[in-house]
Amino acid sequence: MNDSFKWFGSVGVLILAIAGVSLLAEFRSSIYSTSTTVGIFALLALPLGLLYGQGGTVSLAQGAFAAIGAYTTAIITTRYSLSPMMSLLPAVVLPALVAFIIAKPILRLPELSLALVTLSIGTVVEVALQRGGDFTGSFNGINGIPTLPFVGTSRIRAHFVIWTVVLLLVIAYVNFMSSLRGRALNAVRTDHLLAEAMGVNVALDLSLLFAITAGVAGLGGWFYAHTLGYVAPDSLSIAVSANVLFMVVLGGRKSVLGPIIGAAIFTLASDFLPGTESQGIFFGGILILVLLFSPDGLMTLVPRRWQRRPRVPASVSPEVRPAVQTTGAVR
């Protein structure tokens, strides 16, 4: 079984899941709304899974970057009466640019310090939006946030559009991780010094990955603004960033589908649990259990026969072979 076939399994499972949900939604239309919410969270969690699970870099700023994307499109489409399609590129590029600028000085920090710094970024963005007055106030359908031209108010179309985007991201994810550069990223997560010795520009690669993560979060914010039709300073707050990290840890940070599974579990549990206190008890309890019995997330419970260690060329010396098998850095 080659790498492309192995990774195709993730794409195939996601396609089957989307088809199954679409079939169920024909009998209960509210499923479309829930599915759209899961898709938006998946857009935030999936790139964080790549950054944290494959790059070994944690971030608590996904909500902040999504808020930048959401407010960018809300301001452009309401203040300047432009089409949402005209605001798509700025909503993605602006958070990516901000992330790339701040990446180099902060990504060299230890994991705990990095988490605190990215959490502070979320605080700064949230306070800035709150103090922005009418320019960054609340936006809703009454104030003019338009729906997407190819979606309108149709929950069915919103469901299919968002999950098409998620599917394309999964395909890009699996292709990237099957490439030499993706294997080098795993080397960065395992050992920075080893990765640098193999010729990997660790600082640049992590900065670009951080920027891509923020850009995809901005895309999620763009969808959030135009599908939910409402944006406020507390819509994509620090709590959202913490919830997205919870989704990644719960589902499995080293798995392609782990963040999506975590997003689905979180959304469904939030819908069924009655209040904030019960949700906190449930999510706290399940997080403790996962960290105790399955530290790498629920996807590690998949039978190991479906997992395969990377092939190591015969030319690699026995001394280097264990490191290569761990990082998967040699094709």
Image (tube, rainbow, N blue to C red):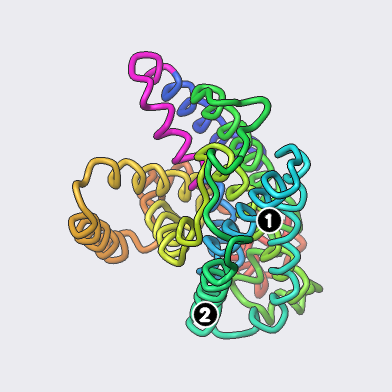
At x 70%, y 63%, the residue is 211
Task: Reply yes or no: does residue 303 show up in magenta.
Answer: no
Of tags 2 and 1, the one toward the viewer is 1
* Quadrant in which residue 124 is drawn: bottom right
Could you say where residue 175 lies in the image, as x and y percent from the top left?
A: 70, 44
Inspect this view and state whether residue 225 appears.
yes
Q: Which segment did they paint magenta?
A: 23-41
Could you say where residue 25 lies in the image, as x and y percent from the top left?
A: 39, 20
Q: Which residue is mark 1?
A: 215
Magenta stretch, main secondary structure, is helix
Inspect this view and state whether residue 45 appears.
no
Image quadrant containing the N terminus = top right
Could you say where residue 80 lies in the image, as x and y percent from the top left?
A: 75, 47
Specify whether 230 is left or right of 101. left
* Quadrant in which residue 78 is drawn: top right
Q: Residue furthest top?
A: 27
Specify whether 5 is left or right of 98. left
